[in-house]
Image (cartoon, grey):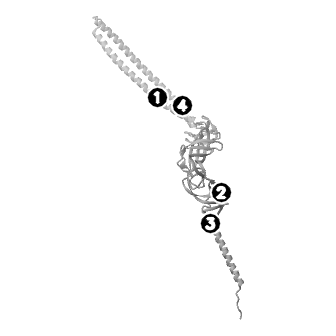
Amino acid sequence: MDIVRTNKKNKLTNKIKIIISLLIISTLILFFVFNTSSASYQVNRDSLLIGTVQHGELNISVRGTGVLVPKDIRWIAINVPGRVERVLIKAGAKVKKGDLLLELNNPQLQQQLIEAQWELLAIEAETQARKVSLESDLLDQEIAVINEKLNLERALLTLDAQKILLGKGIVAVSRIDHEEVKIDVTQYKQRLDLEQARLDKRRENLNAQVKANEARLNIMRKSVQRIQQQVDSLHVKATMDSIVQEMPMELGQQIDAGTNLAMLARIDLFIAELRIPEKQIKDVMVGQKVILDTRSSKIQGIVQRINPAVINSSVQIDVELLGTLPKEARPELTVDGIIEIIKIPDTLFVKRPMFANSFSQSSVYLIDDEGRYANKHNVKFGQMSSQYIQIEQGLKEGQSIIVSNASSWEQHQQIRIN
């Protein structure tokens, strides 16, 4: 009878396989645990921006970029239609007040001026003729008054002579003649009063007629003056010492009344228009000092106006420039502006981490003393400037934190720095 024997070699092989499998599983478990630990994420040091906590005075400022724009900008328009005959100045040219920019043509308007001038001459002649006629009538009336006055004086002389003779008892003058003379005196006196009243009325009529004619004449003169100004406006001239910003006119172009012909900008008066991020505009107020950098010079200024509207996540502010402007100042020159908000003495501050906000609590990665690891750490921030942020709680002087973008590893409590 055959006896079946167990193969010891096969049993040993199975045990080895089981041991190897257990080792592999343990290795995988350890690898998984290692990769889910707090220091499982590694970062290259060269890719990090690191800020060190400092102690001292913190100047809170807000930074913005913008351009210089002329403070005084004027569009030159025309109030009559016309056709462009000549273009003497192009955009970019410097002009002085009174310099000729364009010449326009309007034959109908020029004809209106000639007709109005002839009508004015006719009215002036009619007015003068009417005045002469009225003055002549006035003279005739003055003569009539003088004649009645002489008749009255003659009658009074006769009456006085008769009174003297009758008083002496001389009968050379009859009573009838004496009474007739009395009647003549009364009559001449009444006629003088009437002629004098007529003279006064004629004088009033003369003054009224003269005023009416002068009013009509002045209306016509104003009309001629208005048309003359319209004709003169066909010669478009600069209204101030400036630089021509825009000149959209072309030869032969027909333009309507009210069309803008050229834009002028003064070259000695500028303001700066800066764009400030909407998150920082709450700290900006009118009257704050501003330092503008043109890349070549520094310009002092103050905040003059804050636009109430937010456009593309920023707010525009106008800065009034102080002192003498540098030589490079010109329209649309790019400038950087730093607005001085406040100075905080004796405080802790650090370079502002990305996405950090003022007066908020946030987490940062605090680097250990050896510089090998960075751990998540809670911090309370205070005032914030364009580069630095105040630390109210959570950090000490000399400690270092990561200030670059940490969004790719923010789920890890600890990272390793290579």
Three-letter amino acid code at the position of disc 3? Ser
Q: Position of residue 133 (x, y in %)?
A: 45, 23
Residue 117, numbered label? 4
- Mark in front: 4 vs 2: 2
Three-letter amino acid code at the position of disc 4? Gln
Q: Position of residue 75 (x, y in %)?
A: 57, 41
The residues tagged by marks 4 and 1 sit, at their Cα atoms, a distance apart of 17 Å
Asked whether the residues under the numbered discs 4 and 3 touch, taking CB atoms below 8 Å apart as contact, a structural biologist would say no
Q: Along the horizontal axis of the image, is 175 left or right of 271?
A: left
The residues tagged by marks 3 and 2 sit, at their Cα atoms, a distance apart of 21 Å
Residue under label 1 = 213
- Looking at the rendered structure, the secondary structure element under dot 3 is loop
Residue under label 2 = 48
Sequence order check, earlier mark of 1 and 3: 3
Sequence order check, earlier mark of 4 and 2: 2
The residues tagged by marks 4 and 2 sit, at their Cα atoms, a distance apart of 84 Å
* Residue shown at 39% from the left, 16% from the top: 146
- Mark in front: 1 vs 3: 3
Q: Position of residue 250 (x, y in %)?
A: 63, 42
The residues tagged by marks 1 and 3 sit, at their Cα atoms, a distance apart of 107 Å
Q: Position of residue 339 (x, y in %)?
A: 58, 46
* Residue shown at 35% from the left, 18% from the top: 191
Residue under label 3 = 37
